[in-house]
Amino acid sequence: MNIDIVVPKNNEQEFLLMAEKLGYTAIIFFYKNKPEIKKITHEKVQVFIACSEKTNDVDLVIHEHDQRDREIIERQQAQLISKLESEQRKDFIRQRASGLNHVITTLMHQKNVSVCFSLNEIIYAQYRSQLLGRMMQNVKLCRKDKVKMILASLAPIPYAMRSPHDLKALAIVLGMHPEEAKAALKNACEICKKNNSK
């Protein structure tokens, strides 16, 4: 099952049409705030709901990188962390300021928290080569400490979405093995289904 995560703003139906055209079988609508949440169904595309706050009607909690990352991971307040590579600090000589290190990835593995790589971040990055380098480093760290990786468009508009094939190709460019790239498009769905079963 291929799934994408998008950030709708009253354009959920347009996203669903695009998801169907691109060949997705499921989609996650990521709402930053609880009042924005809408319950929408579709005949061919399964719909899940994500939010930055934990509530009963949410399938997935996504935390966007900030200074509270470690606290969020330790308290298991989110299942997914995104935009780790948007760190404002400069890169070091031998290591990039990618938002991750061995201590954090070990903790993420223990607490079952995943990393999300965002296509939207790449498209709109001011320093794209720096961002890609940070993502490549994070792929290596995640692999080493067995942290689940997720790749999504996090598109704010339907036309910013890309096909599952394009996302898999990007995952391989970032250094994922073909099997990891395939899993990166399914892992979010597995987390949502696991949360629903609870």
Image (cartoon, rainbow, N blue to C red):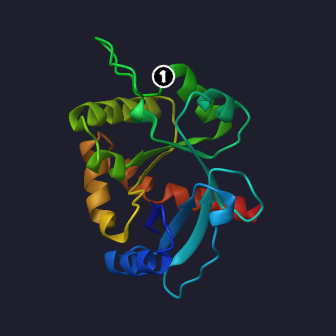
Residue occupied by mark 1? 101
How far from the left and from the top, in percent, is residue 98? 40, 27
Q: Is residue 68 visible?
A: yes
Q: Quadrant of residue 77?
A: top right
Is 167 left or right of 37, judged from the image as shown?
left
Question: Which type of secondary structure does the marked residue at label 1 adopt?
Answer: loop
Residue 160 is situated, as x and y percent measured from the top left of the image, at 31, 63
Q: Residue at x 53, y 57 (%)?
A: 188
Q: Which residue reaches farthest top?
A: 93
Q: Position of residue 67 (x, y in %)?
A: 57, 27
Which is nearer the eye, 128 or 173?
Answer: 128
Residue 116: percent from left, percent from top:
47, 46
State left or right for residue 32 relative to residue 14.
Answer: right
* Vertical side of 186 occupied by 147: above or below: above
Depth check: give the residue in front, 65 or 170: 65
- Residue beneath the point at 56% across and 20% down: 103
In which image quadrant can residue 193 be found? bottom right
Q: Residue at x 40, y 26 (%)?
A: 88
Classed neighbour count for the residue bearing mark 1: other residues with Cα under 10 Å, few (<14), some (14–19), many (≥20) = some
